[in-house]
Structure formats: C-alpha cells, structure tokens
Image (cartoon, coloured by chain):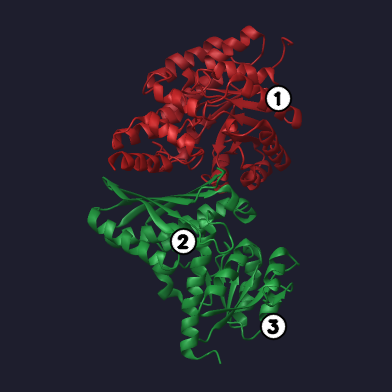
Amino acid sequence: MEKVKVAVIGPGNIGSDLMYKIFRSEQLEMALMTGIVESEGIKRARNLGIKTSTEGVQAVLADEEIKVVFDATGAKPHLQHAPLLKAAGKIAIDLTPAAVGPYVVPCVNLDQVQTEPNLNMVTCGGQATVPIVYAINQVSKVKYAEIVACISSKSAGPGTRQNIDEFTQTTAKALTVVGGAEKAKALIVLNPADPPMMMTDTVYAEVENPDEQAILASVETIVKQIQSYVPGYRLRVPPIIEGNRVTAIIEIEGAGDFLPKYSGNLDIITSAAIAVAEKLAAKILKKGEVA
Amino acid sequence: MSGTKSIHLVDTTLRDGSHAISHQYTAEQIATIAAGLDAAGVEYIEVSHGDGLAGSSINYGRSAISEEEMLKAASSVIKKGTLTVLLLPGIGTQEDLEMACHYGAKAVRIATHVTEADIAQQHIAMAKKIGLKTFGFLMLSHMVEPEKVVEQAKLFESYGADVIYVADSAGAMLPEDVKARIGAVVNAVSVPVGFHAHNNLTLATANSLAAIDAGASYIDGTCRGLGAGAGNCQIEALVGVLNKKGYQTGVDLYKIMDVAEGLVEPIMHRPQVVRNSAFMLGYAGVYSSFLLHADRAAAKFNLDPRDILVELGNKKMVGGQEDMIIDVAYQLAKKRGA
C-alpha cells in the first residue's frame, strides 16, 4: 500500500514515541527525524535506519516528498517553523502549546478542520477530556465544565513543568471552543507515587436538564470512538448525575510504544496526532498527490 | 535560647480556615477579621480560597464571593500587616497573581507538593519581578525524607524565594519528624525557614515549638485553629506559649484572643475538635483538605470515612486530588456490592 512521507521535528520523548507509532501505521512512512543537536533521540532513529538531521526544520523544507510534519519541539520554535512549513506546502501537526492553527480533537472536530495547513493538538488533558464534555453537550447543554488532570510526576517533562499555566489555560479554552461548554476550568496535579499512577482525569459538567440515560449513552459512544485510536482509554467511573452536575472519571493506559505504560498522558496526544495524520494521508493518497 | 528572638507569624484563618467553613466567607467577615488581626499586630495576613487563588471550583468547593471581593475587603482594612495570598501552580496562574497584586496583595506563598518544586519556577520569578515578598511552600513534607525536602527547598531558593516553608499538610508529623526536616533545611539554605502545622495528631503547637527549636523563624496559625482537617496551630494560644518561652511576635495576646473568641468563633460551622476522621488524616498521612469531601463521599456511598481516608493514604494521593475521593469511594462501594 502506498504511504505518505512524514517527518518528526524534535527527537525527545514525544518525538520518539511518534516515530514508533508511525512504524506501525499503514498510511505513514517515517522519512525523517530532525533536531538541532546530536542527541539520544537522533541516534535512536539513525540506528533504526531512519534518515536524521541536526539542521532542524531546514531538513524538512529540503525534502519535497515530505507532506506532513509533526512538531514536537516547543511553543517558541514552532512559531518559527509554522510559516516556513506553510510556505513549503506542508501540513503541520503541532504538539506544542503554540496553537498557530485550530485545536483538533480527532473524535470531535477532525472532519471540520482537515483543510487547515496547521493543526494544534491542544494538551494531553484536553485530548482526554474534551470528548467527554462534547459528548455530554450533545445531549444536555453544558453550562460549565471543569476537569482535573492527574499525571504521574515521572511522565511530566520539563516542557510541562515550566509551562503549567499554559496547560490549564489551553485545556480550559479547548473545553469551550471544541467541547462546547459555555465556561470551563482546568486543573492539573502531578503525583509522584511510585510505581507511577496512570493518567487519570475527572470531568465535571454542570448541565441543563440532565437526561441520565442519554448522557450515559453519548459518553459510552465517544469512549468507543476514542478507543479506536487510544486503546488504553477507559471510563473508571461512568457518569454519576446529582442534580444538574455530571461527574465522570477516566484513565489512560499508554500503549508502551516508546514511553512506559503509565505515560497515558503522552500516549493520548501522540495517538491523537497519528490519527490526524492518517486521516490527512488518506485524503492526500485519494487525491493522488503522491506519485 | 536568647529571650529576644523574634518569630514572624502568618495568620491563615482567612485562607486555610476557609476549608472548615466550606469557603463561605463573606466580604464583611473578611474585613472584620482582617482588621482585628491587623490591630492585634499580626505580621502576615493570608487571604485566599483554601486551595489558593482560583481554587473556587467544583473540585475544591466554590467560594461565596470572588477573589477580587475578598482581597478588596482585606486590603481596605489592613494598615500595618502584609496582605498575603496563596497560589498553587496547576490551580492558579500568573494572571491570578497579577490580579491579586492589583487588589493589594504584598506577599505570596507559592505552594507545590514536596517533590514538585520545579513547577513553581515561573511563578516565583514573576512574583519577585512584580515586587512581592515570595515564600516557597512545600506541602505534605512528611511524605519524603529530609534529604529530599532539602533538595526541593534549594530549588525554591535558586528561583528567588525569600522564605522557605516546610508544611505538614497532613498533620502527620511527630516533633522529631519536624525537627529533622526543618533542621536539615535551615542548614542548607540561607533564607529564613517556616513551618505550617495541622493538628490532626493534636501536635500542632508542640510541632511548631519543635520547628522553632530546629531554627524556624516563621510559623503559621489560625484563630481557634480553624483550618482543614483538625485545623491548624491555634494562633492565640501560640502567641501565649511563645510569650511564655520569651519569644517576641509583635502580637498582643489579649487582642488576638478577642479576635478568636469574638469574631472567628461565632462564624465557625462546628467546634474545631479532633474528631475520628480528622485524626485519621494525620494517622494515615492524608491531605487535611480532604476531610469534609471524604465525609460527604462516605455519606453518599454509605461508607465509613476512615476507610476512604486510609485508602487515599495507601494510594499516595497528594494535595489537589479531591476528585480521587469520589473515585476511591466509588471503587470501595463497588467492591462491597460485588
């Protein structure tokens, strides 16, 4: 089967996990891993027979065959990469908090945004909780959504730690823009327990006229859709309804591709990014843009 | 011990105390209590939601009034003392801190779990930049060995914190645990060190004295001990005890006793005594703010709150994970039903 060539910028934990997921994809071909210095991640990719570079985004721009680019660097580098990739006609899937393009949560709005040249993957907490809020909002209007994301300390890298305000702000924004809540708030807690606990997210929603059966059905349906690209996504506590408040708790076990299984927070964002890329690849291949 | 040593007191009746009244302070109560504390000579007066700025939420409980109103009420009456706020990165943001500064906050305590000091780097830097007196506050310090507390305290110091706090958020420490941690931090950093007690094991005052013996010069307390779990160190009693020990606090004993009895006691929802589930917090090493949430979950799922608290301790839940009380109660109830 024909595949679409993709590149990963940023050979850290997220970039390396993306690479392993690309290996398993039937539509994507791992054409390039690029960073700005020689690193463990670059070495790892090279040892696996992947073309590598320390020229950063330039190496991507130099390869015309690369159609889709994952950016797993940081917000500041992505702000520089985004216009260059756009000018070169490459679609950027942004795993940084830069949010140059619209937020995308695959099971919610991928069909609406797939013509955009730049797609932002929100945050791990956003990927995990926006679908639940969206599902509730489909059947009972969500006036206010609040989520608590708990991730293990070991799986929170320096990017998350030094930008914790961006995490809460971006996640809250996506709960309204993509999830449909009128207002939203996001909280994040790091838990250092050893062995590390799995990523756990609690979703609270205040709704108008809750219809318990409809909410349960809607949430169960979206959970199945998420499981199609994140198999370790589970409802720990199915929606409990008290008055106008809905409470649900989910947990995410990572696939263990590159990162340990407790890193469900990283797995959900890389899995979502791959789901976006595969959808784009199908479109590109259908159009016959790849020779 | 020299009889002239000064101890800086931080009153957190209007912050930690808000847990015990489910965050229902009115602007009038805040203004009256803050004015009383200020007139009594309290140096730092902390005012925030119990879980810090932006803590008003479903997860932690909603405040009766907005943070702007709380801070306006306090800053309009505080003349001598320093209006202080609490911020937990992950809950509050730098924007919230800017708001607090705008409404008169002059000091901020930035709190993280004892192993996660690095999530506060940007907030401490920003607080210093806007001219706030900045405290680094390590929560649930009983959960790790003194060496780890020192490592994290040094991170706070390197980010620019003016004071480092060791907090016994679960009220789980014995006096020797306090001495070991405070002593190690005092030796390792060049800034003053403080201690925040909870009374779950009925040791809040004893532990505060142990902290002072080990070199702490900042101590927290609340009127009538009002606070999360079994409450905090009872500040009016602490002032008296410190007087007897020959320490200066700058606080007038009768005036602070009058604030406690005349202003705070009448608004308390229940006497701040060490009931069974509050004691269990300290015994199992669980975050004190979980108490009322665990009592509610126990009622809802028909469980003994002690079982919920012990399970939360086993699972090593940290501050801010109030949502996991529902999870633990749900799983316990499911197991019972199965």
CA gap between label 2 and label 3 equals: 32 Å
**Residue furthest front as drawn:** B338
Residue B106 visible somewhere in the drawing:
no
The mark found on residue A159 in the picture is none
Which residue is located at x 61 percent, y 73 percent? A82
**Quarter holding residue A38:** bottom right
- The three-letter amino acid code for the residue at tag 1 is Gly
Q: Position of residue A262 (x, y in %)?
A: 53, 53
Q: Is residue B252 left or right of residue A183?
A: right
Query: Mark 3, residues whose alpha carbon is within 10 Å: few (<14), some, or many (≥20)?
Result: few
Judging depth in this view, the residue of B101 and B221 nearest the camera is B221
CA gap between label 1 and label 3 equals: 59 Å
Quadrant where the C terminus of chain B sits is top left
- The three-letter amino acid code for the residue at tag 2 is Gln
Mark toward the start of the polypeptide (2 vs 3): 3
What residue did someone put label 3 on? Answer: A62
The chain identifier of the residue carrying mark 2 reads: A
Q: Position of residue B248 (x, y in %)?
A: 66, 14
What residue did someone put label 1 on? Answer: B183
Is B161 above or below relative to A129? above
| Total numbered labels placed on residues in the image | 3
What residue did someone put label 2 on? Answer: A127
